[in-house]
Image: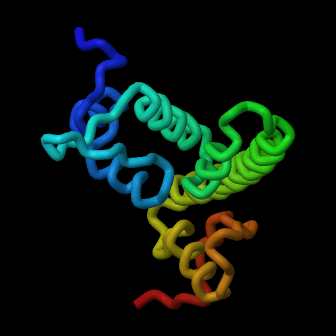
Amino acid sequence: MKDPFEPMTIGALAQAAGVNVETIRFYQRRGLLRAPERTEGRIRRYGAPALGRLRFIKAAQRLGFSLDEVAELLRLEDGTHCAEASLLAAQKLRDVRERLADLQRMEAVLSRLLHACQSSAGTVCCPLIEALQEGAVDGQPSHELREVDVRPSPPPHPENNPAP
């Protein structure tokens, strides 16, 4: 096994961090990761701090932080800015809770639409397709879920539809 403190090429760093080389280059362009100076052989060698920083970035992303937010967290990474980091985390938690509420609303609507589709077998109009078409026609923003009446339409009255 390689010594984790031995300088690594960009490929070895990428492998150790579980990312691809282009991700490292992208992070360098964004200012999230510094590119080390080139050696005499014109090869960049990355040390353990670069690996730690990549792991920090990936861990923050798994918690839902954007790269801009990760940059702010990296600015605070010396650990002496707990109040600022807490504010960022509190905002992220609010965002996550908002997304969860949106997902729960979507689940409820989809569940009702699915049930309506299954209970209206044989009708001419699919309640799911009809609800989606009505949503598009209403101009409802896609991020807002409105309550949709998903009850199947009653069968037509025979007196309104004379036999052929």
Q: Residue at x 26, y 29 (%)?
A: 8
Q: Residue at x 34, y 17 (%)?
A: 4
Q: Residue at x 82, y 45 (%)?
A: 84
Relative to 136, is 8 on the left or the right?
Answer: left
Q: Quadrant of the C terminus?
A: bottom left
Viewer-nearest residue: 43 or 52:
43
Residue most toward the left? 41
Locate residue 2, reporting x and y percent: 24, 13
Viewer-nearest residue: 128 or 85:
85
Relative to 140, is 35 on the left or the right?
Answer: left
Locate residue 119, reporting x and y percent: 56, 55
The quadrant in which residue 133 appears is bottom right
The quadrant in which residue 160 appears is bottom right
Locate residue 92, reporting x and y percent: 73, 47
Up the image or down, 86 lies above or below 135; here it is above
Residue most toward the top? 1
Up the image or down, 63 lies above or below 12; here it is below
Q: Residue at x 69, y 52 (%)?
A: 99
